[in-house]
Amino acid sequence: MIAIYVLFVVLLHVPAVQHNIASKSAEIISEKLGTKVEIGGVSLGLLNRVILDDVVIEDQKHHKMMSCHRLSTKISIISLLNGRIDISSAQIFGMNAILTQADANAPVNCQFVLDSLASKDTTSHTPLDLHIASLIIRNTNISYDRLDKPKKPGVFDTHHLSFEKISSHIMLYELTDDSLSVRTKKIAFTEKNSGLSVSRLSFIANAGKRSARLKDFSLVTKSSDISLDADLAFRQKVISKFNISSNLTSVSTNDIGFFVPQLKKLNKTFFIDADVYGTDKSMDVRRLSISSS
């Protein structure tokens, strides 16, 4: 069995074999999604690592929706047989995703992909159980445009987003129907339309149906350095209690100006130290210190 596996790995490094498997894989995925899919090459590394090169997926209007230089993942077959998706490592290099939506009532152009992956059996439900020990993303661009909305240059506009040079290292410890546990060591990106540049976003988040905890949240831009911890409790999908504390946080009006343009003219930096507790009916400001530059 080991000899057969090694032989299979060796064969997948032969260009002709890679091309044939890539072509057949693209054909199967195209039929599944109902659109054109291209895969430049498929190779198999040791210990269940699958590598896809030069992947291109079109949307249903035959526009390029996603292209990626390299996708790599290492998945546990034993866990998969037991209903758990256990990915020890995943890597995305050089991806360019173009998402569009005609209007508020129309689906996003990638919705058909999600629909094709959904189970056709509506009488039963397979619980989600996903674990990714390490997800690395490099040199990736993601854009989104609402086609019926005009663009607003210089402002962070949720109808027109263009995230460029995305770089991240994420560890998804657990994602199920009832819970989430994730740690982001670093996320960096630039939002082209507004000019907002984030050099580091990191945090630890644990959430369930009734509570959520955000620990060691850090957001660093050219002008701001925001750090805080937060605890939230929910009742009937509404926040019933919260506790937010922040230490040595600096917020620049230049960064707030990406959302409220009038504040850019102030050109000030505020330093905030706070501890706030509250419920859905009251708020207790236990500590608050604000100073400016």
Image: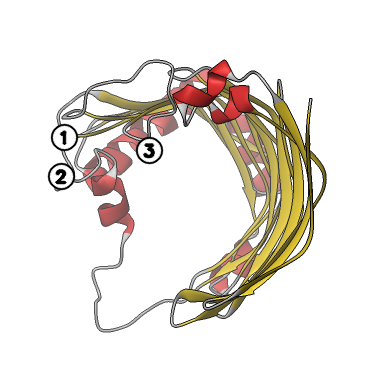
Closer-to-camera residue (194/136): 194
Residue designated by label 1:
102
Identified at 37% across, 15% down, the residue is 153
The amino acid pointed to by label 2 is: Ala
- In the depicted view, which residue is nearer to us: 133 or 170? 170
Callout 2 crowding tier (Cα within 10 Å): few <14, some 14–19, many ≥20: few
Q: Position of residue 44 (x, y in %)?
A: 61, 37
Q: Amino acid at mark 3?
A: Ser
Residue 96 drawn at (x, y percent) = 44, 23
Tell me if label 2 and label 1 are in contact, CB under 8 Å: yes
Query: Which residue does the image show at 15% across and 44% down from the upper left?
Result: 106
Q: CA distance from mark 1 to mark 3?
A: 31 Å
Question: With respect to residue 227, does 116 lie above or below?
Answer: below
Determine crowd level at label 3: few under 14, some 14-19, many 20+ residues with C-alpha closer than 10 A: some
Q: Nearer the viewer, residue 256 or 25?
A: 256
Above or below, 69 against 115 in this view is: above
Marks 3 and 1: in contact by CB < 8 Å?
Answer: no
In front of the other: label 3 or label 2? 2
Residue matched to label 2: 106
Please state the horizontal and vertical placement of residue 263, each as a whole percent of the image. Answer: 53, 25
Residue identified by numbered label 3? 25
Disc nearer the start of the sequence (1/3)? 3
Instruction: Please name which of the two marks, 1 or 3, marks the residue nearer to the observer.
Output: 1
The quadrant holding residue 72 is top right
Q: Can the viewer see residue 14 in this picture?
A: no
